[in-house]
Image (cartoon, rainbow, N blue to C red):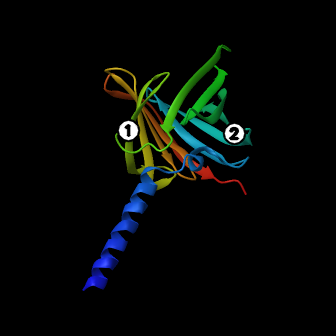
Amino acid sequence: MAGRSAERIAFMRTLLLAALALQAAPLDDLWKFKAETGWTYKKIENGEESKIVARSLGEEAGKARIEWKEFKKEGALKKTTVITWSIEEGVLTADAKGKDPDGQEEEIVFGVIKEGAKKDDTWKTPLGEMKHLGTVELIVPAGTYKNAVQTRLSLGEDGRVDFLLVPKVGLVKIALVEGGKETQTWELTEFKPAK
């Protein structure tokens, strides 16, 4: 009888450790990818569809660079952005630099997830407060992911941005909600690990 009790306790500890591992995925698994790893996304903005093709340019000095090329539905290049991922003060941070269609420089910096964060934790970023929403099952065109880490950037009363990342895959979905309505989404349609 005592042996079964010890087995149950050991089993429960194993389950608890597994759940914690999913909730607090190592940050490196979310952003460090070999050069030539590739992602393709479908972007919908105000009902208009475009395609984003991203590829890792590699990692150097604690920073990983990803080139994003956005194409209009008919195939013309709309813009190119380089996103530099790094850990800044314990927060996985993206620094996106590019040019808008008129050739004007654009830059946006945002923190996506804090190291060691778990469900309901919050932290400040330059754009607003972030919150860890836990892990969810997510279905996107590239497949079903059972352990997507979801964080939310609050943009005031009527706005938010949800980020969903999967260990060893990276960013799988972004959803921007403004005025209670989803105005932009990026969903992963294909992931190609580097060989």
Quadrant assignment, res 120: top left
- In the depicted structure, whether residue 76 falls above or below residue 24: above
Residue 88 figure quarter:
top right
Residue 178 visible to the viewer: no
Which residue is located at x 61 percent, y 28 percent? 95
Q: Quadrant of the C terminus?
A: bottom right
Q: Amino acid at mark 1?
A: Asp
Q: Label 2 belongs to which residue? A: 62
Q: CB of mark 2 within 8 Å of CB of mark 1?
A: no
Q: Which residue position holds label 1? A: 121
Instruction: Depth check: give the residue in front, 14 or 45.
Output: 14
Nearer to us in this view, 73 or 99: 99
Q: Answer few, some or many: residues within 10 Å of disc 2's Cα (few below 14, many 20 plus, some between 14 and 19).
A: few
Q: What's the residue at 60%, 51% (across, down)?
A: 191
Q: Which numbered disc, 2 or 1, marks the residue that appears first in the sequence?
A: 2
Above or below, 23 relative to 48: below
- Locate residue 4: give its quadrant: bottom left
